[in-house]
Amino acid sequence: MSGEEWEIVAFTLRVAALATLLIFGPGIALAWVLARRDWPGKSLVETAVMLPLVMPPVATGLLLLELLGRNGPLGGFLHRHLDLTVVFTWRAVVIAMAVMSFPLLVRAARIAFEGVNPRLEQIARTLGAGDPRVFATITMPLAMRGIVAGTVLAFARALGEFGATILVAGNIPGRTSTLSLAIYGHVQLGQDADAFRLLLVSVVIAFAAVWISEWCLRRGSRAR
Amino acid sequence: MMLTMRNVRLELAEFPLLVDLEIAGQVTAVFGPSGAGKTSLLDLIAGLRRPTSAHIALDGRTLADTARGTFLPARERRIGYVPQDMALFPHLSVRENLAYGTARGKHAADGGRTPVASNPRLDFPHVVEILEIAPLLDRAPASLSGGESRRVALARALVSAPVILLLDEPVAGLDQRLKDRILAYLERIRTELELPILYVTHEADEVMALCDEVLVIERGRIIERGAPSALFHRATQEVFSRRSSNEEGAKP
């Protein structure tokens, strides 16, 4: 593989990791709130969060483009006040990946939290633990398997993101070109051999991600 | 120990829990059929559910007062609660389960506002000895038998240095031999630890074996209270008199 191709791989891993990191905190928090609290309008929030999962990725990409473009409400603000351009930069790639992966993380973490018997948390409180301690010592450890699985799933989804990314970030070689975008570009130009090399790399990365998460889970269960 | 519950109202699925009572006894049974509101009553005292209205106080300490908007969170109440499913933390060893609540004794979670009347009888080694769980300390909760996990759950509540112990059907589902063993442990807790106990059950023989007073609860209301022997004696008489009057009525 050429140096250019390695750069694409490194770039893809970097932005996907950044996107996963970006959504981890808010995703876990939202999942917990959805699993443990009730408020009017909750179902609206649930539906809105799941939208990117069911909408065509290209449609999500178009929405993001309108929102983040220099004349868009959010993009305009960032451009005027922070001199920050989002669309057609690596930032747009991260945002597209984050938006598309978010529902997967929230869903998995929510199911994991719902699987934790609330009675355990209640009894921990009667034993003198405040909410942060209950969360850190009871809820999180017991939901850990589901959260790890959800995080890996979100990361894998980010790695493969295509539809939203190509609209909001384009496929600019050396700037926004990820593995998926590069494979598409190669196929478009009839460079099948190049496309297959990158395909192989994608498979290896996906395999490694799943294998590492399984290994983490096995280790976690042995420690108990 | 004095637990007062005034004008308590808590909405349940089919009927409200309505309670107005004082409990001062050593071991008090809350006796009634399934679904009468027994567990809800314990949850209320432990601070796991918020009442619609109530004034609840324990030894002069206000736990909840809806008129003033006071609600002491569960973690500051110092109430030992052993729920029916025991709720042992499955990811922690027995030792870690026990240790979970002991931090409170050293540095109270509420910054020392609650007077910690430390009871030296409730220290870790003594409780472990009384319930004979030393050989279990390094085991995982999933590997414990029914009787063992009950003793561990009891121990975990005790070492958190509570001022009262709430037990929700602590021997339900055990065979008679195990039941007698656990009751013997509870008897030791009662005599050696001098800790007041609120004991929820629907079995009369447990009440007779352990309790000084019994509150009979039905559809969310305390319908009768008194000494177990007097109450069950009267109940038995009523059953017999009802049966004999039925037999008389059936005569031609």
Image (spheres, rainbow, N blue to C red):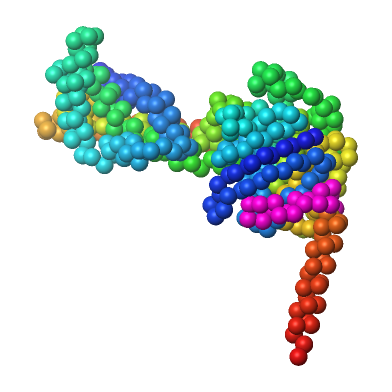
Tell me, yes or no, if residue A127 can be seen here.
no
Judge left or right: residue B76 versus residue B226. Answer: left
User: Could you tell me residue B27's position as x and y percent?
Assistant: 81, 44
Return the x and y of residue B244 as percentages of the image width and height.
80, 77
At 23% from the left edge and 22% from the top edge, which residue is drawn? Answer: A92
Residue A6, x across and y down, in percent: 28, 21
Above-or-below relation of A112 to A97: below
Front residue of this view, candidates B211 and A28: B211
Compare residues A97 and B232 and report the one nearer the observer.
Answer: B232
> Can residue A19 be seen from the camera position used here?
yes
Most foreground residue, A109 or A119? A119
Instruction: Judge by depth and name the residue closer to the eye, B198 or A11.
Output: B198
Tell me what residue is drawn at x 69 percent, y 19 percent: B113
Residue displayed at 62% across by 29% down: B72
Residue B112 within the magenta-colored segment of the rendering: no
Quarter of the image for the N terminus of chain B: give it.
top right
Question: Hey, which quadrant is residue A23 in on the image?
Answer: top left
Which residue range is magenta in the image? B209-227
